Amino acid sequence: MLFELRQYTIEAGERERFVELMETKVIPFQVSQGMVILGSFVAEEDDQTYIWMRRFRSEEEREQLYDAVYNSDYWRDEITPALSGLMNREGITVTRMNATPRSPIQ
């Protein structure tokens, strides 16, 4: 399994709108395309940090799902414009991870 820990910097005052968009549009769409979302989080003491995790069976699956999601008309026409002004795209950090042999998350 391959995991992604994705951390975003949300524009000041936009966390509520951003989380609503993630939970009602972005995550459901990605799940409908086959992505496995393990969790969605906001930082407790920082209202500009949003974190979420995804899991893929392999690099090949990750590449296929990226293509299905990010090259879709829906993503281009609906999601990209909706995200505009809600997050700092330069503030995206993606950490690719592999679970250790005895990790409870597999």
Image (cartoon, rainbow, N blue to C red):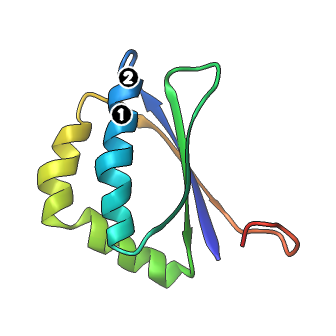
Q: Residue at x 39, y 75 (%)?
A: 34
Q: Residue at x 28, y 73 (%)?
A: 68
Q: Is 68 on the left or on the right of 45, as rendered?
A: left
Q: How many marks?
A: 2
Which quadrant: the C terminus?
bottom right
Q: CA distance from mark 2 to mark 1?
A: 9 Å
Is the C-beta separation of discs 2 and 1 under 8 Å?
A: yes
Mark 2 is surrounded, within 10 Å at the Cα level, by few (under 14), some (14 to 19) or many (20 or more) other residues, namely some
Q: Residue at x 74, y 66 (%)?
A: 105
Say which of 71 and 40 sits in front: 40
Say which of 61 and 18 sits in front: 18
- Above or below, 16 against 8 in this view is above
Mark 1 is surrounded, within 10 Å at the Cα level, by few (under 14), some (14 to 19) or many (20 or more) other residues, namely some
Q: Earlier in the sequence, mark 2 or mark 1?
A: 2
Q: Position of residue 92 (x, y in %)?
A: 47, 41
Q: Secondary structure at mark 1?
A: helix
- Above or below, 59 against 72 in this view is below
Query: Which of the 4 image quadrants contains residue 45?
Result: top right
Residue where numbered disc 2 is placed: 11
Q: Is 98 on the left or on the right of 88, as rendered?
A: right
Q: Amino acid at mark 2?
A: Glu
Q: Is 55 on the left or on the right of 92, as rendered?
A: right
Q: Position of residue 40 (x, y in %)?
A: 53, 46
Q: Amino acid at mark 1?
A: Phe
- Residue sticking out furthest to the right: 102
Residue where numbered disc 1 is placed: 18
Q: Residue at x 35, y 37 (%)?
A: 20
Q: Secondary structure at mark 2?
A: loop
Which quadrant: the N terminus?
bottom right
Q: Which mark is residue 68?
A: none
